[in-house]
Image (cartoon, helix red, strand yellow):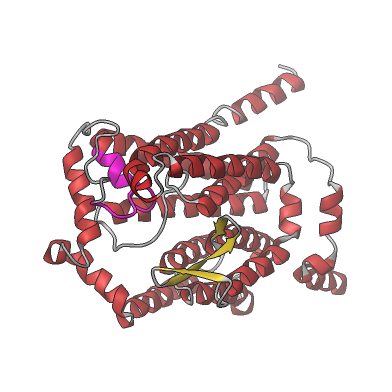
Amino acid sequence: MSKLDLKAAANEQADEFAWVLPFCVLALASIGVVMVASASIAFAADVYNDSWYFLKRHLVFLAAGALGALVVSRISLQTWSSLSWTLLMFACGMLLAVLVPGIGREVNGSSRWIALGPITVQPAEIAKFCCLIFFASFLTRRHEKLRHWTSFMVPISVLGIVALLLLLEPDFGSVVVISGTALAMVFLAGARLPHTFLLVALAACGLGLMALVSPYRLQRLTTFLDPWGEQFAGGYQLTQSLIAFGRGEWFGVGLGNSVQKLFYLPEAHTDFVFAILAEEWGMVGGLVVIGLYAALTWSLLRLVRKALAKQAFFAALLTFGIAVLLAGQAFVNMGVASGLLPTKGLTLPFVSSGGSSLVVCFALFALAWRAQKEVNSDTEEAASGIGKISQLPIFNPLQLGDRKTEEAA
C-alpha cells in the first residue's frame, strides 16, 4: 500500500466517529425545542397571552446560537488562545457590572442579569466560555511548571476571583460548575496529586461552609433531605418535580399531556424541563436524553485523547474542559430535578429555555468542532489577520513574560 493510501486510510479512520458530536448536539437541541414548547404553553398563554411566546423566544436564541457557533468555528484555536487574557478581563468586567445597581437586574433576590434592550444577558454564562479558554491557554503554556506551588497558585487565584464575583450575585451553582471544571483541567495539565487533592478538599470545605452559614442555602439543604416534610413550603418545587417523575412511569403520559406544567411545577420550561420530559416521555425518554449526553461526553473525551496523541495540548485541555462543564451541568440539572442533589439554578444544556445559556452552549460546541477539525487535519491553516493582531503582547500580558523568560534562557 502506498503512502497516499495509508494517509487516506488514517484520515478515514480519524473521521469515523466525527458525526457523533454534531448529531448529539442537534438531537438535544431538537428535543429542547419540543419540550420548551410543551412545558411553557400554559404559562405563556396565561402570562403573555401567547401560547408560543417562549417557543418563539427559544427559536430566536437558537438561531443566534447557531450564528454565533458559525463565527466561533471560523476562528482558529491559536487566535482564541492568544486572546485568553482579554477574554478573562472581559468576563470579570461583566461579573462586576452585574453587581452595580441600575445595571444588574435583580430577580428572586439574585442579581445575575444585565438588561440590553429587549434581551437580558447572564454574565455567568459568558464567564464559563471565557474561563475555559483562559485556563486552557494558561495551562498549555505553563503545564511544565505546575508542579511548583508558585505556578500552581496562579490559575487557582484567578479561579478564586471569578468564584468570589459569582458568589456576590449570588450564583452558587455556577461556582460549583466552573470550579469543578477548572480543577479537572489543572489535574489533566499535570498538577501534583497532593496539591490537587488538598485544593479539592479545601474547596469542598469552603463550599460546604458557605452552604451552612447562608440561611436560604441551609434551608435548601434541609428540604432536599426531606422534601415531603415541607411539601407546601421549601420543598414544594422538588415534590412537584418528583410527582412528575412518578406520573411518567415507563413510557410517559404522552407529549403535551403533562399535568405538572399546568402551574404546579415552577420553572417547568427552564431548570425543571427534565421533570416534564420524564412525565411526558417516561423513564425510556429520560434514558434516551441521558444516553445522548453520555455519547456527547464520550465523543469529546475521545477527541481529547486524539489531541494529546498529536501533542495539541491547547485543543486537548479546551475540549476536556468543555466535556467536564457540559456533562457536569447536565448531571447537576437532572440530579436536582430527580431529587438526587439540592436545588440549583442551572439549565439543562441545549434543552432548557434560556437565552445566554443556549448561545454559550452552542459556542462551546463550535470550539469543540473547531478543535476536532484542526486535530483531524494534517495541515495547519495560515494565521488570519485577526490572529496576527491578537498575538501582540498588549492583548495577553502573560505572553510577554513568557518571551522574556525564553530570551533569558
Image position of 261 with respect to 102: above or below: above
Q: Position of residue 376 (x, y in %)?
A: 67, 35
Corner quadrant of residue 108:
bottom left
- The one of 2 and 396 positioned closer to us in this rendering: 396
- The one of 120 and 29 positioned closer to us in this rendering: 120
Determine if residue 305 is in view: no
Is 347 displayed left or right of 385 in the figure?
Answer: left
271 part of magenta stretch:
yes
Q: Quadrant of the N terminus?
A: top right
* Residue plotted at (23% across, 51% down): 264
290 part of magenta stretch:
no
* Residue plotted at (56% across, 48% down): 359
* Residue plotted at (59% across, 44% down): 65
Q: Which stretch did the figure color magenta? A: 264-279
Q: Quadrant of the C terminus?
A: bottom right
Image position of 291 with respect to 409: above or below: above
